[in-house]
């Protein structure tokens, strides 16, 4: 029986599935684990350095990453967050999560996803989104939401392909490289 109000807690490092990306590389999708710490630090700081369309603008110290990962793994054990990381040649190259909203919105999951430069455009994002959605359905979530920079056409293409539609826009939510950029909220109702 699916309990509508509790995520099935996933173990750390639990393998979800493996596949071959469009460039021939073998990819393992799995939940996060402690051993990801150094790869995660490299991953987040490379996204910041690149100026990727993520909220964070400042590099992260190892101590901050230890604190972040401890919180995520504890929340994962409680079943309130579900992570899908992608591993290639023994290293984490992408991460994503669904965070269950609290209170009257416990049927809603908020998605975040980012793939390291050099590993994009070969289908990893698509497979991660599929894995997130499958888990969301299993644990009884009814609504998935995410937010994206209006300038991030690549991400919006992925989300539209996965069945998300634009359901809101906050004008000028971000200021990046001298320009204001709208935030777009996208939603998928899980039937
Ligand atoms: C956005 C992101 C998650 C997409 O993941 P990805 O692994 O590169 O995507 P995929 O290879 O699975 O492609 C998925 C779809 O995205 C679109 N897409 C991918 N690369 C694209 C590009 N260069 N230009 C336009 N659309 C593109 C296509 O619609 C593609 O579907 P298709 O291959 O069936 O045509 C990834 O590019 C990324 O992490 N970018 C940096 C961080 C970021 O922007 N995160 C999202 C924040 S909201």
Image: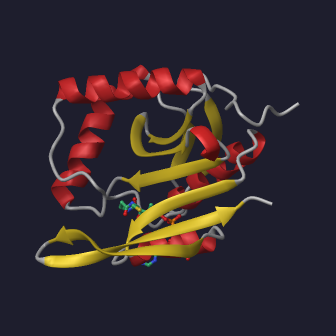
| Residue 53 in view in this figure | yes
Return the residue nearer the eye: 109 or 130: 109
Q: In this view, does 44 lie above or below 71?
A: below
Q: Position of residue 121 (x, y in %)?
A: 45, 67
Q: Is residue 113 above or below residue 90?
A: below
Q: Quadrant of residue 65?
A: top left
Q: Where is residue 43 in the image (x, y as percent from the top left)?
A: 29, 44
Q: Where is residue 162 in the image (x, y as percent from the top left)?
A: 63, 67
Residue at the right extreme, as displayed: 1
**Left or right of 108 on screen, residue 158:** left
Residue at the front extreme, as displayed: 104
The residue sitting at 30% across, 64% down in the picture is: 53
Return the residue nearer the eye: 14 or 91: 14
Return the residue nearer the eye: 22 or 154: 154
**Left or right of 2 on screen, residue 186:** left
Quadrant of the image containing the C terminus: bottom right
Residue at the left extreme, as displayed: 178
Q: How many marks?
A: 0
The residue sitting at 70% across, 47% down in the picture is: 141
Q: In this view, does 107 lie above or below 183?
A: above
| Residue 35 in view in this figure | no
The residue sitting at 49% across, 73% down in the picture is: 168
**Left or right of 159 on screen, residue 60:** left
């Amino acid at each position: 029986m699916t309990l509508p109000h509790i995520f099935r807690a996933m173990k750390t490092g639990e393998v979800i599935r493996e596949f071959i990306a469009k460039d021939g590389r073998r990819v393992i999708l799995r939940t996060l684990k402690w051993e990801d710490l150094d790869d995660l630090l490299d991953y987040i700081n490379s996204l910041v350095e690149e100026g990727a369309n993520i909220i964070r603008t400042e590099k992260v110290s190892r101590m901050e990453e230890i604190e972040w990962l401890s919180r995520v793994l504890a929340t994962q054990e409680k079943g309130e967050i579900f992570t899908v990381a992608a591993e290639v040649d023994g290293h984490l190259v992408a991460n994503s999560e669904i965070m269950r909203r609290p209170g009257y919105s416990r049927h809603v999951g908020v998605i975040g996803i980012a793939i390291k430069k050099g590993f994009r455009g070969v289908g990893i994002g698509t497979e991660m989104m599929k894995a997130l959605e499958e888990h969301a359905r299993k644990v009884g979530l009814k609504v998935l939401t995410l937010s994206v920079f209006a300038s991030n056409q690549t991400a919006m293409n992925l989300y539209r392909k996965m069945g998300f539609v634009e359901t809101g826009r906050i004008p000028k939510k971000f200021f990046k490289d001298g320009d204001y950029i709208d935030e777009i909220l996208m939603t998928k109702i899980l039937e």
